[in-house]
Image: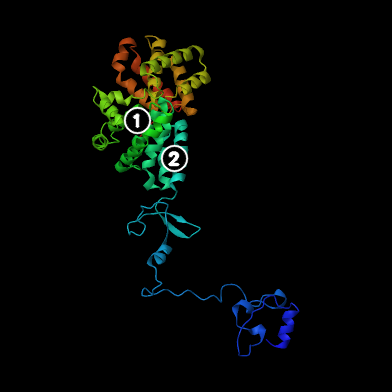
Amino acid sequence: MTAKERSRVAQGEYNFVAIICSRTPLPKFDTFLCPCIAMFNRKGKWVDAMDGSDAIAALPIDKDDPLYDEEEIESGRYVLSSTADADITSLNATVNGYDPVAEKAVYGPMLTLAEFKIRISDAIREYFDSADADEVVRGIEEMKCQDYHPEVVKRAISVSLDKGPRERELISRLLTCLHPYPLADQDLEAGFELLLDSLDDLCIDIPDAKSMIGSFLARAVVDEVLPPAFLSNRNNTHPGDGVVEKAVSLLSREHCTARLEKVWGPGDGRPVSELKAEMDQLLKEYLLSRELDEAASCIREMKASHFHHELVKRGVTIAMEEDGLDHTSNSSSLDAMAALFSFLVRNAIVSEFQVSKGISRLRKILPDLKLDVPAAPAMLDEFEEMAREGGCLPAKTTNC
Protein backbone atom coordinates (compact mmCIF):
# COMPACT_ATOMS: atom_id res chain seq x y z
CA MET A 1 0.00 0.00 0.00
CA THR A 2 1.05 3.55 -0.53
CA ALA A 3 1.50 5.97 2.36
CA LYS A 4 -1.73 7.71 1.39
CA GLU A 5 -3.74 4.48 1.45
CA ARG A 6 -2.24 3.43 4.78
CA SER A 7 -3.37 6.71 6.27
CA ARG A 8 -6.86 6.14 4.95
CA VAL A 9 -7.01 2.71 6.61
CA ALA A 10 -5.81 4.16 9.89
CA GLN A 11 -8.54 6.81 9.75
CA GLY A 12 -11.25 4.11 9.30
CA GLU A 13 -12.21 5.02 5.77
CA TYR A 14 -12.09 1.31 4.79
CA ASN A 15 -14.26 -1.34 6.46
CA PHE A 16 -12.09 -4.26 5.41
CA VAL A 17 -8.30 -4.63 5.37
CA ALA A 18 -6.38 -7.20 3.36
CA ILE A 19 -2.78 -8.02 4.14
CA ILE A 20 -1.16 -9.21 0.98
CA CYS A 21 2.45 -10.31 0.83
CA SER A 22 3.77 -9.35 -2.55
CA ARG A 23 6.93 -7.82 -3.88
CA THR A 24 5.13 -6.23 -6.82
CA PRO A 25 3.56 -2.81 -6.46
CA LEU A 26 -0.22 -2.93 -5.88
CA PRO A 27 -2.70 -1.12 -8.13
CA LYS A 28 -4.97 1.59 -6.90
CA PHE A 29 -7.19 0.24 -4.09
CA ASP A 30 -10.54 1.22 -5.65
CA THR A 31 -9.74 -0.85 -8.73
CA PHE A 32 -8.10 -3.70 -6.88
CA LEU A 33 -9.20 -7.01 -8.39
CA CYS A 34 -9.53 -9.03 -5.17
CA PRO A 35 -13.25 -9.95 -4.99
CA CYS A 36 -13.22 -9.83 -1.17
CA ILE A 37 -12.35 -6.11 -1.16
CA ALA A 38 -13.40 -4.74 -4.51
CA MET A 39 -17.05 -5.28 -3.60
CA PHE A 40 -16.88 -2.58 -0.94
CA ASN A 41 -16.23 1.13 -1.27
CA ARG A 42 -15.24 3.68 1.30
CA LYS A 43 -17.70 4.54 4.02
CA GLY A 44 -19.26 1.02 3.72
CA LYS A 45 -20.80 1.56 0.25
CA TRP A 46 -21.15 -1.16 -2.41
CA VAL A 47 -19.12 -0.87 -5.58
CA ASP A 48 -20.10 -4.01 -7.48
CA ALA A 49 -23.62 -5.48 -7.73
CA MET A 50 -24.18 -8.74 -5.83
CA ASP A 51 -26.65 -10.21 -8.31
CA GLY A 52 -24.60 -13.31 -9.00
CA SER A 53 -23.49 -12.05 -12.37
CA ASP A 54 -19.85 -12.34 -11.32
CA ALA A 55 -20.27 -15.94 -10.12
CA ILE A 56 -18.38 -18.57 -12.00
CA ALA A 57 -20.66 -21.25 -13.46
CA ALA A 58 -20.00 -24.75 -12.20
CA LEU A 59 -18.48 -26.85 -14.92
CA PRO A 60 -19.76 -30.38 -15.40
CA ILE A 61 -17.49 -33.01 -13.93
CA ASP A 62 -16.11 -35.49 -16.40
CA LYS A 63 -16.80 -39.16 -15.71
CA ASP A 64 -13.04 -39.82 -15.77
CA ASP A 65 -12.47 -37.25 -13.03
CA PRO A 66 -11.46 -38.89 -9.70
CA LEU A 67 -14.00 -36.62 -7.92
CA TYR A 68 -16.91 -37.77 -10.13
CA ASP A 69 -19.78 -39.19 -8.03
CA GLU A 70 -22.55 -40.77 -10.06
CA GLU A 71 -25.01 -40.88 -7.13
CA GLU A 72 -24.55 -37.17 -6.48
CA ILE A 73 -25.19 -36.34 -10.13
CA GLU A 74 -28.28 -38.58 -10.31
CA SER A 75 -29.72 -37.25 -7.03
CA GLY A 76 -30.58 -33.97 -8.71
CA ARG A 77 -33.39 -35.65 -10.62
CA TYR A 78 -35.55 -36.66 -7.67
CA VAL A 79 -36.22 -36.26 -3.97
CA LEU A 80 -35.37 -39.26 -1.84
CA SER A 81 -38.45 -40.80 -0.28
CA SER A 82 -38.87 -41.99 3.29
CA THR A 83 -38.68 -45.67 2.39
CA ALA A 84 -35.49 -47.59 1.90
CA ASP A 85 -37.09 -50.11 -0.44
CA ALA A 86 -38.33 -47.77 -3.17
CA ASP A 87 -36.48 -48.28 -6.46
CA ILE A 88 -36.24 -44.60 -7.33
CA THR A 89 -33.57 -45.07 -10.00
CA SER A 90 -35.66 -47.56 -11.91
CA LEU A 91 -37.23 -46.49 -15.16
CA ASN A 92 -40.50 -47.99 -13.93
CA ALA A 93 -40.58 -45.88 -10.77
CA THR A 94 -43.83 -43.96 -10.39
CA VAL A 95 -43.84 -40.25 -9.71
CA ASN A 96 -46.08 -39.72 -6.66
CA GLY A 97 -45.95 -35.96 -6.52
CA TYR A 98 -43.94 -32.79 -6.90
CA ASP A 99 -42.02 -30.99 -4.18
CA PRO A 100 -42.47 -27.23 -4.77
CA VAL A 101 -39.61 -26.39 -2.41
CA ALA A 102 -37.02 -28.59 -4.06
CA GLU A 103 -38.72 -28.17 -7.46
CA LYS A 104 -38.29 -31.88 -8.15
CA ALA A 105 -40.41 -34.96 -8.58
CA VAL A 106 -41.06 -37.19 -5.59
CA TYR A 107 -40.71 -40.95 -5.83
CA GLY A 108 -41.99 -43.34 -3.18
CA PRO A 109 -44.29 -42.50 -0.23
CA MET A 110 -45.28 -38.88 0.22
CA LEU A 111 -45.30 -39.27 4.03
CA THR A 112 -43.14 -40.85 6.66
CA LEU A 113 -44.41 -44.02 8.31
CA ALA A 114 -45.23 -42.15 11.53
CA GLU A 115 -47.24 -39.52 9.64
CA PHE A 116 -49.06 -42.21 7.69
CA LYS A 117 -50.07 -44.04 10.88
CA ILE A 118 -51.47 -40.86 12.40
CA ARG A 119 -53.53 -40.04 9.31
CA ILE A 120 -54.88 -43.57 9.00
CA SER A 121 -55.90 -43.60 12.66
CA ASP A 122 -57.75 -40.30 12.21
CA ALA A 123 -59.46 -41.59 9.06
CA ILE A 124 -60.59 -44.76 10.85
CA ARG A 125 -62.07 -42.79 13.74
CA GLU A 126 -63.97 -40.56 11.31
CA TYR A 127 -65.16 -43.68 9.51
CA PHE A 128 -66.66 -44.98 12.75
CA ASP A 129 -68.86 -41.86 12.85
CA SER A 130 -69.77 -41.57 9.17
CA ALA A 131 -69.60 -45.22 8.00
CA ASP A 132 -68.48 -43.82 4.64
CA ALA A 133 -65.99 -46.35 3.26
CA ASP A 134 -65.58 -44.40 0.00
CA GLU A 135 -64.10 -41.48 1.93
CA VAL A 136 -61.47 -43.77 3.47
CA VAL A 137 -60.61 -45.17 0.06
CA ARG A 138 -60.18 -41.65 -1.36
CA GLY A 139 -57.99 -40.65 1.58
CA ILE A 140 -55.68 -43.63 1.11
CA GLU A 141 -55.37 -42.91 -2.60
CA GLU A 142 -54.56 -39.24 -1.97
CA MET A 143 -51.79 -40.08 0.51
CA LYS A 144 -49.92 -42.04 -2.19
CA CYS A 145 -48.05 -44.27 0.23
CA GLN A 146 -48.40 -47.67 -1.39
CA ASP A 147 -45.43 -49.08 0.50
CA TYR A 148 -47.30 -48.53 3.78
CA HIS A 149 -50.62 -50.11 2.75
CA PRO A 150 -50.14 -53.17 5.02
CA GLU A 151 -50.26 -50.76 7.95
CA VAL A 152 -53.87 -49.92 7.01
CA VAL A 153 -54.99 -53.47 7.88
CA LYS A 154 -53.06 -53.58 11.12
CA ARG A 155 -54.12 -50.11 12.24
CA ALA A 156 -57.80 -50.52 11.32
CA ILE A 157 -58.24 -53.81 13.18
CA SER A 158 -56.16 -52.68 16.16
CA VAL A 159 -58.27 -49.55 16.63
CA SER A 160 -61.51 -51.55 16.47
CA LEU A 161 -60.49 -54.12 19.08
CA ASP A 162 -61.26 -51.84 22.02
CA LYS A 163 -64.48 -50.62 20.40
CA GLY A 164 -67.90 -52.25 20.10
CA PRO A 165 -69.20 -54.91 17.70
CA ARG A 166 -70.56 -52.16 15.43
CA GLU A 167 -67.07 -50.77 14.82
CA ARG A 168 -65.66 -54.25 14.19
CA GLU A 169 -68.40 -54.91 11.66
CA LEU A 170 -67.55 -51.62 9.94
CA ILE A 171 -63.87 -52.61 9.72
CA SER A 172 -64.76 -55.97 8.16
CA ARG A 173 -66.85 -54.14 5.58
CA LEU A 174 -64.06 -51.61 5.03
CA LEU A 175 -61.55 -54.35 4.22
CA THR A 176 -63.97 -55.62 1.59
CA CYS A 177 -64.19 -52.12 0.06
CA LEU A 178 -60.41 -51.70 0.06
CA HIS A 179 -59.79 -54.95 -1.81
CA PRO A 180 -58.49 -55.35 -4.49
CA TYR A 181 -57.86 -51.61 -4.88
CA PRO A 182 -56.17 -49.73 -3.33
CA LEU A 183 -55.07 -52.70 -1.18
CA ALA A 184 -53.84 -55.64 -3.25
CA ASP A 185 -53.70 -59.27 -2.09
CA GLN A 186 -50.10 -58.96 -0.90
CA ASP A 187 -50.94 -55.81 1.07
CA LEU A 188 -53.73 -57.55 2.98
CA GLU A 189 -51.62 -60.64 3.67
CA ALA A 190 -48.71 -58.51 4.85
CA GLY A 191 -51.09 -56.46 7.00
CA PHE A 192 -52.47 -59.54 8.76
CA GLU A 193 -48.90 -60.79 9.24
CA LEU A 194 -48.02 -57.52 10.98
CA LEU A 195 -51.14 -57.81 13.11
CA LEU A 196 -50.40 -61.38 14.18
CA ASP A 197 -46.77 -60.54 14.95
CA SER A 198 -47.90 -57.74 17.29
CA LEU A 199 -50.47 -59.91 19.05
CA ASP A 200 -48.53 -60.17 22.31
CA ASP A 201 -48.57 -56.40 22.76
CA LEU A 202 -52.27 -56.20 21.90
CA CYS A 203 -53.18 -58.86 24.46
CA ILE A 204 -51.70 -56.73 27.24
CA ASP A 205 -54.40 -54.08 26.78
CA ILE A 206 -57.11 -56.28 25.22
CA PRO A 207 -57.27 -59.79 26.74
CA ASP A 208 -59.78 -61.02 24.12
CA ALA A 209 -57.63 -59.85 21.19
CA LYS A 210 -56.79 -63.38 20.01
CA SER A 211 -60.43 -64.43 19.79
CA MET A 212 -61.47 -61.26 17.95
CA ILE A 213 -58.57 -61.38 15.48
CA GLY A 214 -59.45 -65.02 14.77
CA SER A 215 -62.95 -63.84 13.88
CA PHE A 216 -61.49 -61.12 11.66
CA LEU A 217 -59.38 -63.73 9.85
CA ALA A 218 -62.34 -66.05 9.28
CA ARG A 219 -64.56 -63.19 8.14
CA ALA A 220 -61.86 -62.00 5.71
CA VAL A 221 -61.69 -65.48 4.17
CA VAL A 222 -65.49 -65.63 3.79
CA ASP A 223 -65.50 -62.14 2.21
CA GLU A 224 -62.79 -63.35 -0.22
CA VAL A 225 -60.47 -60.66 1.02
CA LEU A 226 -57.92 -63.18 2.27
CA PRO A 227 -57.12 -66.49 0.51
CA PRO A 228 -57.62 -69.68 2.57
CA ALA A 229 -54.00 -70.58 1.80
CA PHE A 230 -52.91 -67.76 4.11
CA LEU A 231 -54.15 -69.71 7.13
CA SER A 232 -52.37 -72.90 6.12
CA ASN A 233 -49.13 -71.04 5.34
CA ARG A 234 -49.30 -69.23 8.66
CA ASN A 235 -49.97 -72.51 10.45
CA ASN A 236 -46.90 -74.04 8.82
CA THR A 237 -44.60 -71.18 9.80
CA HIS A 238 -46.13 -70.71 13.27
CA PRO A 239 -47.48 -74.11 14.39
CA GLY A 240 -49.87 -74.02 17.30
CA ASP A 241 -50.98 -70.46 16.64
CA GLY A 242 -54.20 -70.09 18.63
CA VAL A 243 -55.53 -67.30 16.41
CA VAL A 244 -55.24 -69.36 13.23
CA GLU A 245 -56.82 -72.36 14.97
CA LYS A 246 -59.71 -70.14 16.06
CA ALA A 247 -60.23 -68.97 12.46
CA VAL A 248 -60.07 -72.54 11.12
CA SER A 249 -62.62 -73.73 13.67
CA LEU A 250 -65.03 -70.93 12.68
CA LEU A 251 -64.64 -71.84 9.01
CA SER A 252 -65.20 -75.53 9.74
CA ARG A 253 -68.66 -75.07 11.23
CA GLU A 254 -71.82 -75.88 9.34
CA HIS A 255 -73.23 -72.93 7.39
CA CYS A 256 -70.05 -71.02 8.24
CA THR A 257 -70.61 -68.42 5.51
CA ALA A 258 -74.01 -67.33 6.81
CA ARG A 259 -72.79 -67.38 10.41
CA LEU A 260 -69.62 -65.43 9.79
CA GLU A 261 -71.51 -62.74 7.89
CA LYS A 262 -73.16 -62.00 11.24
CA VAL A 263 -70.12 -62.75 13.38
CA TRP A 264 -70.40 -59.25 14.86
CA GLY A 265 -74.19 -59.33 15.00
CA PRO A 266 -76.25 -56.96 12.83
CA GLY A 267 -73.60 -54.31 13.32
CA ASP A 268 -74.15 -53.11 16.86
CA GLY A 269 -73.47 -56.33 18.68
CA ARG A 270 -77.06 -57.38 19.33
CA PRO A 271 -78.66 -60.49 17.83
CA VAL A 272 -80.71 -59.87 14.72
CA SER A 273 -83.89 -61.05 16.43
CA GLU A 274 -83.42 -58.51 19.23
CA LEU A 275 -82.82 -55.70 16.76
CA LYS A 276 -85.96 -56.63 14.79
CA ALA A 277 -88.04 -56.60 17.98
CA GLU A 278 -86.75 -53.13 18.84
CA MET A 279 -87.61 -51.91 15.33
CA ASP A 280 -91.16 -53.22 15.64
CA GLN A 281 -91.65 -51.48 18.97
CA LEU A 282 -90.22 -48.22 17.66
CA LEU A 283 -92.41 -48.21 14.54
CA LYS A 284 -95.61 -48.99 16.46
CA GLU A 285 -94.89 -46.21 18.96
CA TYR A 286 -94.34 -43.82 16.07
CA LEU A 287 -97.71 -44.67 14.51
CA LEU A 288 -99.32 -43.81 17.84
CA SER A 289 -97.44 -40.56 18.55
CA ARG A 290 -96.45 -39.42 15.00
CA GLU A 291 -93.35 -37.76 16.55
CA LEU A 292 -90.81 -37.60 13.73
CA ASP A 293 -87.95 -36.20 15.83
CA GLU A 294 -88.35 -38.84 18.54
CA ALA A 295 -88.46 -41.68 16.02
CA ALA A 296 -85.41 -40.31 14.17
CA SER A 297 -83.48 -40.07 17.43
CA CYS A 298 -84.25 -43.69 18.31
CA ILE A 299 -83.28 -44.91 14.84
CA ARG A 300 -80.00 -43.01 15.03
CA GLU A 301 -79.22 -44.53 18.43
CA MET A 302 -79.61 -48.05 17.04
CA LYS A 303 -76.40 -47.49 15.03
CA ALA A 304 -77.37 -50.03 12.39
CA SER A 305 -77.24 -47.96 9.20
CA HIS A 306 -76.53 -50.99 7.01
CA PHE A 307 -79.65 -52.72 8.43
CA HIS A 308 -82.11 -49.91 7.66
CA HIS A 309 -83.60 -51.88 4.76
CA GLU A 310 -85.13 -54.15 7.40
CA LEU A 311 -86.59 -51.05 9.06
CA VAL A 312 -88.29 -50.09 5.79
CA LYS A 313 -89.58 -53.60 5.22
CA ARG A 314 -91.03 -53.92 8.72
CA GLY A 315 -92.38 -50.38 8.75
CA VAL A 316 -94.40 -50.78 5.55
CA THR A 317 -95.64 -54.21 6.67
CA ILE A 318 -96.88 -52.81 10.00
CA ALA A 319 -98.55 -49.90 8.21
CA MET A 320 -100.37 -52.29 5.87
CA GLU A 321 -101.62 -54.35 8.79
CA GLU A 322 -102.72 -51.22 10.68
CA ASP A 323 -104.77 -49.96 7.73
CA GLY A 324 -106.84 -53.13 7.68
CA LEU A 325 -107.71 -55.76 5.22
CA ASP A 326 -109.44 -53.46 2.73
CA HIS A 327 -107.30 -50.89 0.97
CA THR A 328 -108.74 -47.40 0.85
CA SER A 329 -107.36 -44.15 -0.49
CA ASN A 330 -107.10 -42.77 3.05
CA SER A 331 -104.30 -45.03 4.27
CA SER A 332 -103.31 -42.97 7.26
CA SER A 333 -100.70 -45.39 8.61
CA LEU A 334 -99.12 -45.80 5.20
CA ASP A 335 -99.02 -42.00 4.76
CA ALA A 336 -97.39 -41.62 8.18
CA MET A 337 -94.77 -44.25 7.35
CA ALA A 338 -93.97 -42.54 4.04
CA ALA A 339 -93.61 -39.23 5.89
CA LEU A 340 -91.24 -40.87 8.39
CA PHE A 341 -88.87 -42.25 5.78
CA SER A 342 -88.96 -39.01 3.80
CA PHE A 343 -87.91 -37.19 6.97
CA LEU A 344 -85.14 -39.74 7.64
CA VAL A 345 -83.74 -39.45 4.10
CA ARG A 346 -83.81 -35.65 4.15
CA ASN A 347 -81.83 -35.67 7.41
CA ALA A 348 -79.30 -38.23 6.09
CA ILE A 349 -80.26 -40.83 8.69
CA VAL A 350 -81.48 -43.42 6.17
CA SER A 351 -80.09 -43.60 2.64
CA GLU A 352 -82.10 -43.88 -0.56
CA PHE A 353 -80.36 -47.17 -1.25
CA GLN A 354 -81.68 -48.67 1.99
CA VAL A 355 -85.23 -47.54 1.19
CA SER A 356 -85.00 -49.00 -2.30
CA LYS A 357 -83.59 -52.24 -0.93
CA GLY A 358 -86.39 -52.48 1.64
CA ILE A 359 -89.08 -52.04 -1.04
CA SER A 360 -87.35 -54.63 -3.22
CA ARG A 361 -87.44 -57.13 -0.36
CA LEU A 362 -91.14 -56.40 0.18
CA ARG A 363 -91.94 -57.22 -3.45
CA LYS A 364 -90.33 -60.62 -3.02
CA ILE A 365 -92.65 -61.52 -0.14
CA LEU A 366 -95.84 -60.05 -1.66
CA PRO A 367 -97.45 -63.49 -2.13
CA ASP A 368 -97.18 -64.10 1.62
CA LEU A 369 -98.35 -60.57 2.47
CA LYS A 370 -101.46 -61.01 0.29
CA LEU A 371 -102.62 -63.82 2.57
CA ASP A 372 -102.95 -61.36 5.46
CA VAL A 373 -103.52 -58.14 3.51
CA PRO A 374 -105.22 -58.77 0.15
CA ALA A 375 -104.61 -55.20 -0.98
CA ALA A 376 -100.85 -55.41 -0.27
CA PRO A 377 -99.68 -55.02 -3.92
CA ALA A 378 -101.72 -51.84 -4.43
CA MET A 379 -100.66 -50.46 -1.05
CA LEU A 380 -97.01 -51.12 -1.83
CA ASP A 381 -97.34 -49.30 -5.15
CA GLU A 382 -98.94 -46.39 -3.33
CA PHE A 383 -96.17 -46.30 -0.72
CA GLU A 384 -93.49 -46.37 -3.44
CA GLU A 385 -95.14 -43.44 -5.21
CA MET A 386 -95.34 -41.44 -1.96
CA ALA A 387 -91.73 -42.26 -1.20
CA ARG A 388 -90.73 -41.03 -4.64
CA GLU A 389 -92.62 -37.79 -4.14
CA GLY A 390 -91.04 -37.36 -0.70
CA GLY A 391 -87.51 -37.74 -2.05
CA CYS A 392 -86.85 -41.23 -0.67
CA LEU A 393 -86.38 -42.68 -4.14
CA PRO A 394 -85.06 -41.21 -7.37
CA ALA A 395 -87.68 -40.02 -9.83
CA LYS A 396 -88.68 -42.35 -12.61
CA THR A 397 -87.02 -41.76 -15.96
CA THR A 398 -89.15 -41.86 -19.06
CA ASN A 399 -87.73 -43.01 -22.37
CA CYS A 400 -88.71 -40.80 -25.27
* Residue pictured at 36% horizontal, 75% vertical: 64
Q: Is residue 277 above or below residue 186?
A: above
Q: On the rendered structure, is 49 left or right of 185?
A: right
* Residue pictured at 53% horizontal, 20% vertical: 293
Q: Which mark is residue 120?
A: 2
Q: On the rendered structure, is 2 left or right of 367?
A: right
Within-10-Å neighbours for mark 1: few <14, some 14–19, many 20+: many
* Residue pictured at 31% horizontal, 17% vertical: 366
For residue 391, what is the image quadrant? Answer: top left
Disc 2 to disc 1, C-alpha distance = 19 Å
Type of residue at label 2? Answer: Ile
Instruction: Give the structural element (helix, strand or loop) at label 1.
Output: helix
Image coords of residue 267 (percent x, y): 39, 25
Instruction: Give the structural element (helix, strand or loop) at label 2.
Output: helix
Q: Quadrant of the C terminus?
A: top left
Circles 2 and 1: CB distance less than 8 Å? no
Q: Quadrant of the N terminus?
A: bottom right
Residue position for label 1 = 213
Image coords of residue 383 (percent x, y): 40, 20
Q: Nearer the viewer, residue 333 or 244?
A: 244
For residue 306, what is the image quadrant? Answer: top left
User: Residue lying farthest right?
Assistant: 11
Q: Nearer the viewer, residue 3 or 52?
A: 3
Q: Nearer the viewer, residue 297 or 145?
A: 145
Residue 394 visible in image:
no
Q: Which mark is residue 13?
A: none
* Residue pictured at 38% horizontal, 53% vertical: 84
Type of residue at label 1? Answer: Ile
Q: On the rendered structure, is 74 left or right of 286?
A: left
Q: On the rendered structure, is 235 left or right of 331?
A: left
Within-10-Å neighbours for mark 2: few <14, some 14–19, many 20+: many
Q: Is residue 88 above or below residue 58?
A: above
